[in-house]
Image (tube, rainbow, N blue to C red):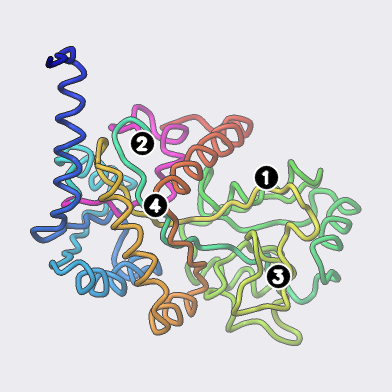
Protein backbone atom coordinates (compact mmCIF):
# COMPACT_ATOMS: atom_id res chain seq x y z
CA UNK A 1 0.00 0.00 0.00
CA UNK A 2 1.38 3.42 -0.97
CA UNK A 3 1.33 6.13 1.68
CA UNK A 4 0.78 9.55 0.12
CA UNK A 5 2.73 12.39 1.69
CA UNK A 6 1.07 15.77 2.19
CA UNK A 7 1.85 18.21 -0.60
CA UNK A 8 4.18 20.30 1.57
CA UNK A 9 6.22 17.22 2.50
CA UNK A 10 6.44 16.17 -1.13
CA UNK A 11 7.70 19.61 -2.11
CA UNK A 12 10.30 19.51 0.66
CA UNK A 13 11.48 16.06 -0.40
CA UNK A 14 11.78 17.21 -4.02
CA UNK A 15 13.71 20.32 -2.97
CA UNK A 16 16.15 18.26 -0.89
CA UNK A 17 16.65 15.78 -3.71
CA UNK A 18 17.23 18.60 -6.18
CA UNK A 19 19.79 20.23 -3.87
CA UNK A 20 21.62 16.92 -3.46
CA UNK A 21 21.85 16.39 -7.22
CA UNK A 22 22.97 20.02 -7.71
CA UNK A 23 25.71 19.58 -5.12
CA UNK A 24 26.95 16.33 -6.68
CA UNK A 25 27.30 17.97 -10.08
CA UNK A 26 28.80 21.20 -8.75
CA UNK A 27 30.48 23.02 -10.36
CA UNK A 28 29.41 22.48 -13.95
CA UNK A 29 30.17 26.00 -15.20
CA UNK A 30 32.28 29.06 -14.28
CA UNK A 31 31.85 30.64 -10.83
CA UNK A 32 31.54 34.41 -10.53
CA UNK A 33 32.80 36.16 -7.41
CA UNK A 34 31.50 39.73 -7.09
CA UNK A 35 33.75 41.76 -4.85
CA UNK A 36 32.49 44.71 -2.85
CA UNK A 37 35.97 45.92 -1.96
CA UNK A 38 38.24 48.14 -4.03
CA UNK A 39 41.30 47.21 -6.04
CA UNK A 40 44.67 46.74 -4.44
CA UNK A 41 43.85 46.57 -0.73
CA UNK A 42 45.01 43.49 1.24
CA UNK A 43 41.60 41.84 1.01
CA UNK A 44 41.51 42.26 -2.77
CA UNK A 45 45.05 40.91 -3.09
CA UNK A 46 44.02 37.86 -1.05
CA UNK A 47 41.01 37.20 -3.27
CA UNK A 48 43.04 37.41 -6.48
CA UNK A 49 45.68 35.11 -5.00
CA UNK A 50 43.29 32.34 -3.99
CA UNK A 51 40.92 32.50 -6.99
CA UNK A 52 43.27 30.65 -9.40
CA UNK A 53 43.92 27.94 -6.77
CA UNK A 54 40.20 27.50 -6.23
CA UNK A 55 39.65 27.37 -9.98
CA UNK A 56 42.22 24.59 -10.40
CA UNK A 57 40.69 22.56 -7.55
CA UNK A 58 37.09 23.02 -8.71
CA UNK A 59 37.84 22.39 -12.38
CA UNK A 60 36.03 25.53 -13.53
CA UNK A 61 37.07 29.16 -14.04
CA UNK A 62 36.63 31.37 -10.98
CA UNK A 63 36.01 34.88 -12.28
CA UNK A 64 36.48 37.91 -10.03
CA UNK A 65 34.41 41.00 -10.79
CA UNK A 66 34.81 44.15 -8.71
CA UNK A 67 31.69 46.22 -8.06
CA UNK A 68 32.88 48.53 -5.31
CA UNK A 69 30.81 51.45 -4.10
CA UNK A 70 27.98 52.35 -1.74
CA UNK A 71 29.83 50.68 1.16
CA UNK A 72 29.64 47.33 -0.62
CA UNK A 73 25.88 47.51 -1.20
CA UNK A 74 26.15 47.33 -5.01
CA UNK A 75 27.92 43.97 -4.90
CA UNK A 76 25.81 42.66 -2.02
CA UNK A 77 22.48 43.39 -3.69
CA UNK A 78 23.66 41.83 -6.97
CA UNK A 79 24.53 38.57 -5.19
CA UNK A 80 21.38 38.59 -3.04
CA UNK A 81 19.29 38.66 -6.24
CA UNK A 82 21.23 35.84 -7.95
CA UNK A 83 20.08 32.21 -8.06
CA UNK A 84 21.28 30.30 -4.95
CA UNK A 85 23.14 27.69 -6.98
CA UNK A 86 26.72 28.49 -5.94
CA UNK A 87 27.69 30.13 -9.23
CA UNK A 88 27.46 33.69 -7.92
CA UNK A 89 29.32 34.54 -4.70
CA UNK A 90 29.94 37.71 -2.76
CA UNK A 91 33.34 38.72 -1.45
CA UNK A 92 32.09 40.95 1.30
CA UNK A 93 33.63 42.95 4.10
CA UNK A 94 32.97 43.61 7.77
CA UNK A 95 30.59 46.44 6.82
CA UNK A 96 28.02 43.65 6.43
CA UNK A 97 27.84 43.36 10.22
CA UNK A 98 27.62 47.09 10.90
CA UNK A 99 25.57 48.35 7.93
CA UNK A 100 22.19 48.16 9.74
CA UNK A 101 23.54 50.53 12.40
CA UNK A 102 25.42 52.96 10.11
CA UNK A 103 23.32 53.10 6.94
CA UNK A 104 19.71 54.26 6.92
CA UNK A 105 17.47 51.67 5.23
CA UNK A 106 20.22 49.39 3.84
CA UNK A 107 19.00 47.56 0.72
CA UNK A 108 19.77 44.13 2.15
CA UNK A 109 19.62 42.15 5.38
CA UNK A 110 22.52 39.77 5.81
CA UNK A 111 20.76 37.01 7.74
CA UNK A 112 17.71 37.14 5.46
CA UNK A 113 19.30 37.67 2.04
CA UNK A 114 22.66 35.86 2.18
CA UNK A 115 24.20 32.49 3.02
CA UNK A 116 27.46 32.64 5.02
CA UNK A 117 30.11 30.50 3.31
CA UNK A 118 33.57 31.24 4.70
CA UNK A 119 35.25 33.90 6.83
CA UNK A 120 38.41 34.23 4.72
CA UNK A 121 40.81 36.64 6.46
CA UNK A 122 40.72 39.32 9.12
CA UNK A 123 42.86 42.45 9.38
CA UNK A 124 43.82 42.64 13.05
CA UNK A 125 45.13 45.94 14.33
CA UNK A 126 48.25 46.34 16.38
CA UNK A 127 48.28 48.85 19.22
CA UNK A 128 51.03 51.19 18.09
CA UNK A 129 52.24 54.08 20.24
CA UNK A 130 54.72 56.86 19.65
CA UNK A 131 58.17 56.25 21.06
CA UNK A 132 57.99 59.27 23.36
CA UNK A 133 55.09 57.80 25.32
CA UNK A 134 56.53 56.17 28.49
CA UNK A 135 54.62 52.90 28.25
CA UNK A 136 55.61 49.46 26.97
CA UNK A 137 52.53 47.29 27.43
CA UNK A 138 48.73 47.38 27.24
CA UNK A 139 48.53 47.53 31.03
CA UNK A 140 50.95 50.45 31.19
CA UNK A 141 49.00 52.25 28.46
CA UNK A 142 45.76 51.88 30.41
CA UNK A 143 47.40 52.95 33.67
CA UNK A 144 48.96 56.01 32.00
CA UNK A 145 45.66 56.96 30.36
CA UNK A 146 43.85 56.72 33.71
CA UNK A 147 46.41 59.02 35.31
CA UNK A 148 46.18 61.44 32.37
CA UNK A 149 42.50 61.49 31.33
CA UNK A 150 41.81 63.15 28.00
CA UNK A 151 45.50 63.79 27.28
CA UNK A 152 46.08 60.86 24.93
CA UNK A 153 44.56 60.71 21.47
CA UNK A 154 44.08 58.00 18.87
CA UNK A 155 43.68 58.31 15.11
CA UNK A 156 40.67 56.94 13.23
CA UNK A 157 39.06 57.29 9.81
CA UNK A 158 35.44 58.00 10.66
CA UNK A 159 32.74 57.51 13.28
CA UNK A 160 31.52 53.91 13.34
CA UNK A 161 34.42 52.55 11.31
CA UNK A 162 36.80 49.95 12.70
CA UNK A 163 39.51 52.19 14.17
CA UNK A 164 36.94 54.39 15.89
CA UNK A 165 35.09 51.38 17.31
CA UNK A 166 38.34 49.89 18.61
CA UNK A 167 39.25 53.10 20.40
CA UNK A 168 35.82 53.65 21.92
CA UNK A 169 35.36 50.02 22.94
CA UNK A 170 38.74 50.15 24.70
CA UNK A 171 37.62 53.34 26.46
CA UNK A 172 34.42 51.67 27.60
CA UNK A 173 36.01 48.38 28.60
CA UNK A 174 38.96 49.77 30.56
CA UNK A 175 37.49 53.02 31.86
CA UNK A 176 39.92 55.36 30.10
CA UNK A 177 39.46 58.44 27.95
CA UNK A 178 41.43 58.27 24.73
CA UNK A 179 40.34 61.13 22.49
CA UNK A 180 39.49 60.15 18.92
CA UNK A 181 40.96 62.31 16.15
CA UNK A 182 39.25 61.73 12.78
CA UNK A 183 41.09 61.66 9.45
CA UNK A 184 39.63 61.34 5.97
CA UNK A 185 41.68 58.23 5.25
CA UNK A 186 44.54 56.19 6.66
CA UNK A 187 47.03 57.92 4.36
CA UNK A 188 50.21 59.92 4.76
CA UNK A 189 48.66 62.73 6.82
CA UNK A 190 47.46 60.34 9.50
CA UNK A 191 50.71 58.37 9.56
CA UNK A 192 52.84 61.54 9.68
CA UNK A 193 50.78 62.97 12.54
CA UNK A 194 51.23 59.74 14.43
CA UNK A 195 54.97 59.53 13.79
CA UNK A 196 55.39 63.15 14.92
CA UNK A 197 53.44 62.49 18.13
CA UNK A 198 50.48 64.70 17.27
CA UNK A 199 48.36 61.64 18.00
CA UNK A 200 49.94 59.13 20.34
CA UNK A 201 47.99 55.92 19.67
CA UNK A 202 47.21 54.24 16.36
CA UNK A 203 45.26 50.99 16.01
CA UNK A 204 46.90 50.19 12.71
CA UNK A 205 47.24 47.26 10.34
CA UNK A 206 50.66 45.74 10.88
CA UNK A 207 51.81 46.51 7.35
CA UNK A 208 51.15 50.23 7.86
CA UNK A 209 53.39 50.75 10.86
CA UNK A 210 55.89 47.90 10.71
CA UNK A 211 58.46 49.88 8.67
CA UNK A 212 58.51 52.49 11.45
CA UNK A 213 58.98 50.10 14.39
CA UNK A 214 62.33 50.32 16.12
CA UNK A 215 64.37 52.09 18.80
CA UNK A 216 63.30 55.70 19.15
CA UNK A 217 60.43 55.21 16.68
CA UNK A 218 57.15 53.34 17.04
CA UNK A 219 56.42 50.75 19.75
CA UNK A 220 53.97 47.88 19.37
CA UNK A 221 52.41 46.99 22.72
CA UNK A 222 49.59 44.66 21.69
CA UNK A 223 47.68 42.86 18.96
CA UNK A 224 43.90 43.08 18.76
CA UNK A 225 43.36 39.45 17.89
CA UNK A 226 42.54 36.18 19.62
CA UNK A 227 46.04 34.84 19.08
CA UNK A 228 49.48 36.33 18.45
CA UNK A 229 50.52 37.09 14.91
CA UNK A 230 53.16 34.83 13.43
CA UNK A 231 54.91 37.88 11.97
CA UNK A 232 55.45 39.46 15.43
CA UNK A 233 55.29 36.56 17.91
CA UNK A 234 56.80 38.59 20.77
CA UNK A 235 53.92 41.09 20.80
CA UNK A 236 51.15 39.86 23.14
CA UNK A 237 47.45 39.96 22.33
CA UNK A 238 45.22 42.44 24.09
CA UNK A 239 43.34 39.49 25.60
CA UNK A 240 46.44 38.50 27.55
CA UNK A 241 45.80 41.66 29.58
CA UNK A 242 42.04 42.10 29.06
CA UNK A 243 40.69 38.53 28.76
CA UNK A 244 37.09 39.41 27.89
CA UNK A 245 37.78 42.29 25.52
CA UNK A 246 36.00 41.76 22.18
CA UNK A 247 38.46 41.96 19.30
CA UNK A 248 37.24 44.28 16.57
CA UNK A 249 38.81 43.90 13.15
CA UNK A 250 38.05 44.50 9.52
CA UNK A 251 37.50 41.25 7.62
CA UNK A 252 36.76 39.71 4.22
CA UNK A 253 34.49 36.74 3.58
CA UNK A 254 32.56 34.69 1.04
CA UNK A 255 28.77 34.63 1.06
CA UNK A 256 26.15 33.40 -1.37
CA UNK A 257 22.49 34.18 -1.97
CA UNK A 258 20.01 33.00 0.64
CA UNK A 259 19.02 29.36 0.25
CA UNK A 260 22.32 28.11 -1.16
CA UNK A 261 22.64 24.34 -0.54
CA UNK A 262 24.89 23.51 2.40
CA UNK A 263 26.96 20.91 0.48
CA UNK A 264 27.90 23.58 -2.07
CA UNK A 265 28.77 26.08 0.65
CA UNK A 266 30.88 23.39 2.33
CA UNK A 267 32.74 22.68 -0.90
CA UNK A 268 33.56 26.34 -1.50
CA UNK A 269 34.69 26.75 2.12
CA UNK A 270 36.92 23.67 1.84
CA UNK A 271 38.62 24.87 -1.34
CA UNK A 272 39.04 28.34 0.16
CA UNK A 273 40.84 26.87 3.15
CA UNK A 274 43.04 24.67 0.93
CA UNK A 275 44.03 27.70 -1.17
CA UNK A 276 44.87 29.73 1.94
CA UNK A 277 47.02 26.85 3.23
CA UNK A 278 49.26 26.97 0.16
CA UNK A 279 52.66 28.12 1.55
CA UNK A 280 53.15 30.80 -1.11
CA UNK A 281 49.70 32.26 -0.57
CA UNK A 282 50.07 32.07 3.22
CA UNK A 283 53.31 34.04 3.01
CA UNK A 284 51.80 36.59 0.62
CA UNK A 285 48.70 37.16 2.76
CA UNK A 286 50.57 37.32 6.06
CA UNK A 287 53.04 39.81 4.60
CA UNK A 288 50.15 42.30 4.60
CA UNK A 289 49.54 41.63 8.29
CA UNK A 290 46.36 39.65 7.64
CA UNK A 291 45.21 36.76 9.81
CA UNK A 292 44.07 33.66 7.91
CA UNK A 293 40.82 32.05 9.03
CA UNK A 294 39.16 30.03 6.23
CA UNK A 295 36.16 28.99 8.33
CA UNK A 296 33.32 26.56 7.71
CA UNK A 297 29.87 27.99 6.87
CA UNK A 298 28.43 27.28 10.33
CA UNK A 299 31.43 28.90 12.02
CA UNK A 300 31.08 32.02 9.91
CA UNK A 301 27.32 32.20 10.53
CA UNK A 302 27.99 32.23 14.28
CA UNK A 303 30.71 34.88 13.88
CA UNK A 304 28.53 37.26 11.89
CA UNK A 305 25.61 36.89 14.33
CA UNK A 306 27.90 37.72 17.26
CA UNK A 307 29.59 40.54 15.37
CA UNK A 308 26.26 42.16 14.53
CA UNK A 309 25.12 41.93 18.14
CA UNK A 310 28.30 43.39 19.66
CA UNK A 311 28.81 46.08 17.02
CA UNK A 312 25.16 47.12 17.18
CA UNK A 313 25.29 47.67 20.93
CA UNK A 314 28.59 49.57 20.70
CA UNK A 315 27.49 51.85 17.86
CA UNK A 316 24.20 52.68 19.58
CA UNK A 317 26.02 53.40 22.85
CA UNK A 318 28.17 55.96 21.01
CA UNK A 319 25.09 57.78 19.76
CA UNK A 320 25.97 57.21 16.11
CA UNK A 321 22.85 57.62 13.95
CA UNK A 322 22.45 55.80 10.59
CA UNK A 323 22.85 58.11 7.61
Q: Using the image, determine if residue 207 lies above or below residue 214.
A: above
Report the mark closest to the observer, 2 or 3: 2
* Distance CA(mark 1)–CA(mark 2): 24 Å
Of label 4 and label 1, which has the lower sequence position? 4
Residue 107 pos. (x, y %): 28, 32
Residue nearer the viewer, 315 or 192: 315
Residue under pointer 3: 197
- Of the residues under marks 1 and 3, which one precedes in the sequence? 1
Residue highlighted by disc 2:
110
Q: Mark 4 points at which residue?
A: 93
Residue positioned 61% across, 58% down in the render: 155
Place residue 283 in its image quadrant.
Answer: bottom left
In the rendered image, which quarter contains the N terminus?
top left
Q: Could you classify mark 4 by the number of other residues whose Cα lies within 10 Å: few (under 14), some (14-19), or many (20 or more)?
A: many
Q: Mark 1 sits on what residue? A: 169
- Image coordinates of residue 201 in percent, x first then y, are 69, 63
- Was residue 88 drawn as part of the magenta stretch in this picture? yes
Q: Position of residue 28 (x, y in %)?
A: 9, 58
Q: Residue at x 84, y 49 (%)?
A: 149
Q: Which residues fall within the magenta stretch?
A: 87-109
- SS for callout 1: helix
Q: Which of marks 3 and 4 is in front?
A: 4
Label 2 neighbourhood size at 10 Å, few (<14), some (14-19), many (20+)? many
Q: Nearer the viewer, mark 1 or mark 2?
A: 2
Asked if marks 2 and 4 touch (Cβ < 8 Å), the reply is no
Q: In this view, does 139 lie to the left or right of 192?
A: right
Amino acid sequence: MRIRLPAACELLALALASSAVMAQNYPAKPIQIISGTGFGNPGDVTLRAIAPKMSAALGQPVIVETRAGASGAIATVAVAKAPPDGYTLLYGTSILATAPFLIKNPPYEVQRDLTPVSFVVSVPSVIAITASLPVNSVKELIDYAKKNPGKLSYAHTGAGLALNLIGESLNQYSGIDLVGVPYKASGSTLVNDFLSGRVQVYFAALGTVRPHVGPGKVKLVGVINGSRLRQIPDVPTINETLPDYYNIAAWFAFLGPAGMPRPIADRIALETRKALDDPQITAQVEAFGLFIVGSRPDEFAAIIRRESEVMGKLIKSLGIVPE
